[in-house]
Structures are given as structure tokens and as C-alpha cells.
Image: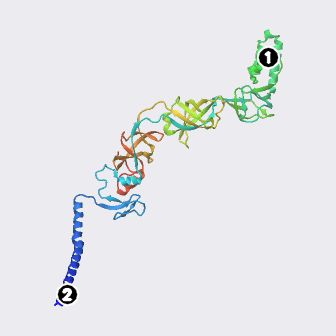
Amino acid sequence: MKQPSTNIIIAAAVALAFAVAGGAWGGYRYGQHGGGATAAASAQTAAGAGERRPLYWHDPMVPGQKFDKPGKSPFMDMQLVPVYADDGAGSEAGAVSINPSVQQNLGVRTAPVVSGALDAAINAVGNVAYNERELVELQARSSGYIERLYVRAALDPVRAGQPLAELYVPEWIAAQEEFLAARRMAGGAQEAQGALVQGARQRMRLAGMSEEQIRVVESSGVVHPRLTLIAPRSGVLAELSAREGMTVQPGAPLFRINGLSSVWINAEIPEALAAQVRPGDAATVRAPALAGQALHGKVGALLPEVNAGTRTVKARIELPNPGGHLLPGMFTNIALAPAGRREVLLVPSEAVIQTGRRSVVLLEHTKGQFTQVEVQTGAETNGQTEIRSGLQAGQRVVVSGQFLIDSEASLKGSTLRMDEGAHP
């Protein structure tokens, strides 16, 4: 009687095992078919509800490579960014929309268009030069010989009244003897103004003698065949053409003296800023040799010539040089203060792109939406550029990452290209 009960228990256990296995298989099949249908229905519902579906994913740093699923970029340490079919929809004509995360990766920075005045100070560099108004040239007035030379080399310092050379002039001997003989024949001082004496005095002038030398001959009553050349002003010998023993002819240059009581500062003004500088503008000059000392002067002239190599205009500043510390050739820093200032629109200079034919900026319409605008620029100084037309105060322009935005626009087929027409 016990044997049949044991068989019944074993049969029930086997049936239970088959039931569990069948339930597991049915659940698996339902997950394969029924669950997949549910997920697809959910995706269709989401799509029907207006959720955007990406066309592909890409790395903004390598925009030409497309991926069909999200993940980490194989090129950069960053996640792939989705690209949607409706990117840029509803934006301004010719604009490109960029995701904020992409902007951060591209390093895009913007700055506002502000209204203000350009910095009054124009900084320039220059150098010290001789004041050519203090230049003196000494030439031979008559034929003669240099018997003695008191200065030996160019750039030697000289002072006013210092003897430079002694010349023997044979032509003077006959003219002086004729004058002394005429005066003796006139019979004294009462007849000294006679026609004969005046004619002899005029011949001494024609021989090249100065009025002072004639007075010396007249007072001493003896012949002076030698001439001592005297420095008419203090300075340096810029040119020395005389040598002992040489013969000189009338008009031959002997000495050139440059004065150093005042000097010129030739400031190199950028061509774009030359219109702001006027004669009479105040100038502050600093030189490394003056140990921080500032010298103050005014612009004397703006030379009508542009240096083809540096594209600068030369402004001449005259400064007194009582101690002689400013020497020709010294480097200087100049700060010019133009008199007139006016309110203008200003943007950072790095925001302006010069294409060769025009000047453009990238304007941010809304967050992440950019368009190209053509502008007319004015003066530029200290990192600020004047905008004469094309922008309004309060707008924001891109100051970094412009060409990366252009690359993004090219990828999306936008008309925002640096080499195409502008869309103000």
C-alpha cells in the first residue's frame, strides 16, 4: 500500500517542474515579441509627441566624421554631440545655431558693443635726431692752405668761440696792402672815408674777409694773411672735411656743426591713428637713458610721408636738451594726447575680421545663434576698434572662435561663411 503513494508524489514533482519551465519560456518569448512591440510603440509615441530624433552624432573638433550612435569620441576626450534635422530652424536668415556645449568646447567668447571714447593717449615709439635748425656749415671763402687744425675727428664736442683751424690766404695780402697804402695816401683819419680808401675796403670784402677782420687790419695797420676759423655755436662736429696741409678752394665745405641745445624726437605714428594727431598736441617723452624721467613737449609737425615698410607717419617733437643727455639715435617711448575726443561705438579689436575686401564681425542674435555682419571701422588703439556703421550699442559680438564657427557653418551648409556676402 506504501509503494503507490511514493509514485504519486514523484509524478506531481515532475509536473510542477515542467510547469515552471514552461512559464519561464513563455515569459522569455513575451519579452522578445510583446516587450519589443511595446518599446517600439513607446518610441513611435515619443516621435509623434514631437521629440527630436538625432540624424547622427559627431565630434565638433572633427566635424567631418559621423557616427550612428552616441558614445565617447575616438579623437578627443569628450562625448559625441547629436545633430538634429531641424537644427537652425526658426533662426535668422544666414545664421547658424550651435549647441551651448559645443560653444564651450570651441572656446567661443562674446563681448558687448559699447559706446565710449577711444583712449586719449596714443602710444608710439621714436628716436632722437639732431635739430636741423641748429646746423651750421663752415666753408672756405678764398683759396688758401690749412696750416693748423685744432680739432681732429668727427663728433668731437666744440663750444662757441673755439678756434677750429688756421688758414693762410695769399689773396688777402695784396688786398690788405692796397688798403693800408690807400689810407696812407689819404693823409690821415680825416681823409679815411675817401673814395680810394672805400674802394680798397670793398676789395678786401670781395677777397672773403669779414667785417671783423677788416676792422682788425684797420686798427693794427699791419697785414694779416692768416685766418682763424671760429666755431659759431656749441655742439658736435657732425662732419670734418679739413686736414692740415690741404689746399682749399672757395666754397669747399670744411666743418659741419650740429647744436645739441635742443633735439627732435621723431615719433612713428601708425597710419590708422595719424588722422588723430595734430600739430600742437601735447607729448610726453621717456627714454631708457633718463632713468624714468619724463620730458614734455608738443608736436611741431606731422610729416607728409608714409613709411612703406612700417606703414607709419612721422610726427616731429622738439625738446630742449640743456644737459645734453638726449643723444641722436636714442630710443624713446612717446605718449601723445590728442585734443579732440568724441563718443563712438567700440568693440574689441580681436572681434573684427579683415577679409581683404571688407571688415566683418560675428553677431550673436540669441544664445547660440550667430550671423555675419559687415562693418565700417575707424581708429584703433589699446585693443579697441571704432565701429562707424553696422552695429548698435548693446549687441554682442564674437571675440574668439570665429573660424571654428565658420567651420561649423560649413558643415551644416549655412550661408554664414567668411568669404561670402554679409547679412546685416
Q: Residue 6 carries which label?
A: 2
User: Can you say which quadrant of the picture contains the C terminus?
Assistant: top left
Residue that numbered label 1 is attached to: 218
**Residue 110 percent coordinates (x, y):** 39, 46
Q: Which of 333 and 316 is in front in this view?
A: 333
Q: Which of 213 and 155 is in front in this view?
A: 155
Check disc 2 and report its element: helix, strand or loop. helix
**Residue 183 percent coordinates (x, y):** 81, 14
- Sequence-earlier tag: 2 or 1: 2
In this picture, residue 116 sits left or right of residue 264: left
Tag nearer the camera, 2 or 1: 2
**Residue 76 percent coordinates (x, y):** 42, 60
Compute the Cα span from label 2 to label 1: 170 Å
Farthest residue toward the top? 190
In this picture, residue 90 sits left or right of residue 109: left
The colouring scheme, among rainbow, by chain, secondary structure or one colour, is rainbow
Q: How crowded is mark 2: few (under 14 residues within 10 Å), some or many (20 or more)?
A: few
Above or below, comparing residue 357 to residue 146 in the picture? below
Q: Residues within 10 Å of mark 1 (few under 14, many from 20)?
A: some
